Amino acid sequence: MKKVKDIYKEFCTVDDAVKFDFETVKRLQSVYSNKLKLELSGAKYFVRAENATLIDHEGNKHVDMMGAVGVMTVGNNNPFVWEQIAKVWDAKCYSMGAVSYHNIASALYRDLALTTPGQKLTKAQTAGGGAEAIEGALKLCKIANRNKPHKTKILATIGAFHGKTTGAVSAGGKDTWQAYQGRLLLDETFHIPFNDVAALEKELSKGIYQGFFVEPIQGEGGVFVASDEFMQKARELCDKYETYLVCDEIQTGLCRTGKFWASEWYGIVPDIITFAKGISGGIMPLAGYIAKPEVFDAAYGTPETAFHHTATYQGSAYACAAGIGALQFMLENDLCGEAEKKGKIIKEAMLAAQKKYPGIIKEIRGRGCLIGVEFNPTKAGLEDKYGPNWAMECERYFSTEFRIQIMHSFNNPKVFRWLPPLTAPMEDVEYALKAFDASVKHVYDLANK
Ligand SMILES: Cc1ncc(COP(=O)(O)O)c(C=O)c1O
């Protein structure tokens, strides 16, 4: 057998990669991938991760209060999830589950169905990421309505984020991500203001919508919680006008808000739920959608349509094992309870800082451990130095002085978001909250100098 280095001298093996120094990693990613993305986001280089602890290449500990934007629900590198993946390797299972019977994929579909509101959503298909799950849900709405020529459109909300593929940016309510791509699906997508019940009724009553896509909390948009009235009316009107209610729970689902699915806060059962992020513990790429069986079958229950949404890695065994492991861990360790308990502590401390240092924080929003802090505009005259609002300086101070991973919302940069692992030890949460207090004080002192 030839050695790969004899074929390509510069081929990097995994053995090489795990020993790379930072300079090598930086050079390779800059030359061979998206240099600017990493530079502009102030990316760090972490070499180890365990629960809410991240270790950088210089051996410094960072506390993770962002969990890769809500992915690390069960903590970084959750050992239980890894053990489940290893079992699939030990059994030498066939790894592909898209168009074959598969033990591991079948178990994940069953388990997911058990968790859904009222156990009414029972048919799922997996995907590789959130946006692909949204594409699947969009197609499901369209294909299920194929014999209803008056149903021509998708309804969504302004400020929504559903991912960055063609359909997902069209359903998303942020034109930044729709730029440079022609008309996308925009001619058949209409956006109403989030939480605007009158607009919802006006549009749905037209009877032309195949699906209404909504996040129970607009996460990327700046952590805006849907009102009870909006979600309950959405359910009622979607029933009345025969529109599928699609809850995008990619950020809010899987215990994040203190319920398994955030839809449960409203006492409603969506027709379709999309999921991603926490589903695989951040170890394998896994996402998907789950639907009521009659909705799923209306789309894929005929020989003509059964193959209309297949993808190579649907039902991938290792990803599904990670999914089963993460679900089991969430249920056995009451991560919904953890989200509520920790979220309450975090919010209370933030409210105290808001009161203690007046004029800096505008609002604290969210549910469970999906929390957004909206900052006020920077004091006049200091914008050039600190940006248009205090979020950036507070975030900079917080993350560099105290080494805490946090990130503002890309779609609404005056809001910075906390999405900690729900397993984060209390001492890490307390450390982050003390750092938060000190960071708001730092900004307050700048504003009052
Ligand atoms: C609500 C929501 N939908 C969809 C997505 C897209 O997911 P992905 O980045 O995995 O494509 C995200 C990602 O942040 C999200 O928060």
Image: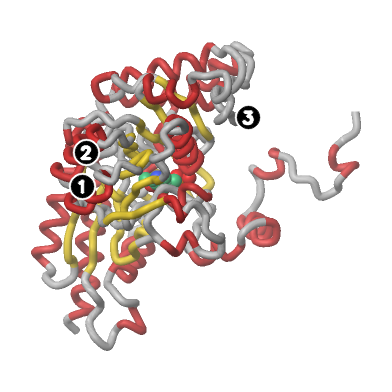
**Are dots 2 and 1 in contact, CB under 8 Å?**
yes
What is the three-letter code of the residue carrying label 2? Leu
Tell me the number on the disc at residue 154: none
Residue where numbered disc 1 is placed: 201
Query: Residue 330: percent from the left, percent from the top?
Result: 32, 26
- Identify the residue at horizontal 43%, vertical 24% (top origin): 298
Query: Residue 38: percent from the left, percent from the top?
Result: 54, 61
Residue 13 vertical placement versus 447 (above, below): above
Q: Quadrant of the N terminus?
A: top right
Residue 173 in view here: yes
Secondary structure, mark 3, is loop
Residue 383 image-quadrant placement: bottom left
Name the residue nearer the viewer: 257 or 356: 257
Name the residue nearer the viewer: 179 or 205: 205
What is the three-letter code of the residue carrying label 1? Glu
Tell me the number on the disc at residue 237: 2
- Identify the residue at horizontal 45%, vertical 31% (top origin): 147
Q: Residues within 10 Å of mark 2 (few under 14, many from 20)?
A: many
Q: How far, Cα to Cα, is label 2 from label 1?
A: 7 Å
**Are dots 1 and 3 in contact, CB under 8 Å?**
no
Q: Quadrant of the C terminus?
A: bottom left
Tell me the number on the disc at residue 312: 3
| Outermost residue to the front | 149
Query: Residue 192: percent from the left, percent from the top?
Result: 29, 55
